[in-house]
Amino acid sequence: MTTLTKIALLAALVLIFSPALGAGTKSCPVPGPAVEESYTWNFSTEVTKLLHEIEHEAPHVSEIAATLDIFIRMPFMFSKVSHAAELNNAKGHVNKIGDRLCRLHQVRRMAEPGQRKTMDELKVTFSALATDTERAIEFLNDRSRPTNLVDPVYGERLAGIYRESSFLRHISEMTWQEDLP
């Protein structure tokens, strides 16, 4: 067994035995009481920074979804393990975006009105992204039937991941550009 095969199998095992994304259901910690730094903290700048981070994280998910689209167009060249490794990578990026959105939720009331509107749009789009990513993982993990990597349902999940991650980037990019002087 080659090293690359071992890495791919390990990635598949991690994906299969790791808990589901939970990004859509994960609750953010409740902010504690205000501390002295809260009164001088520039929340608008922090929100802009977080939106910028989402803008730069989302293309990674889009690229992974595009790679998976290539995989399903050439099903005999790529194994279920290859799909699992790519989806696990996407899951990591989706969770990073979720962490940023969680922080945005915590500071929402201190954000500018336009930033709050963007946060609302991102939340809806992210929920769809997390759901599609989670369902694609569940599809690969479903042991009740043989995995058909050209199944249209699986392809639609991957298309959803691509579409929603591209839209996330677009939403955050528009706000980021609006905040520039």
Image (cartoon, helix red, strand yellow):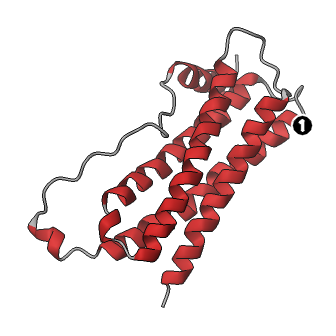
Tell me the residue at 64%/53% (across/down).
165
Tell me the residue at 13%/62% (across/down).
34
Left or right, 109 with respect to 85, comes to left
Q: Nearer the viewer, residue 29 or 83?
A: 29
Residue closest to the far top: 144
The picture places residue 103, in percent across and down from the top left corner, at 35, 56
Tell me the residue at 70%/24% (across/down).
81
Residue closest to the far bottom: 181
Q: Is residue 97 above or below residue 8?
A: below
| Element class at badge 1 | helix
Quarter that holds the N terminus: top right
Residue closest to the far left: 36
Tell me the residue at 35%/75% (across/down).
44
Q: Is residue 172 above or below residue 96?
A: below
The picture places residue 17, in percent across and down from the top left corner, at 52, 18
Q: Quadrant of residue 87?
A: top right
Q: Quadrant of residue 132?
A: top right
Q: Is residue 38 above or below residue 88?
A: below
Q: Residues within 10 Å of mark 1 (few under 14, many from 20)?
A: some
The picture places residue 22, in percent across and down from the top left corner, at 47, 34
Q: Amino acid at mark 1?
A: Arg
Circle 1 residue: 73
Left or right, 67 with respect to 122, comes to right
Q: Quadrant of residue 76?
A: top right
Left or right, 86 with respect to 29, comes to right
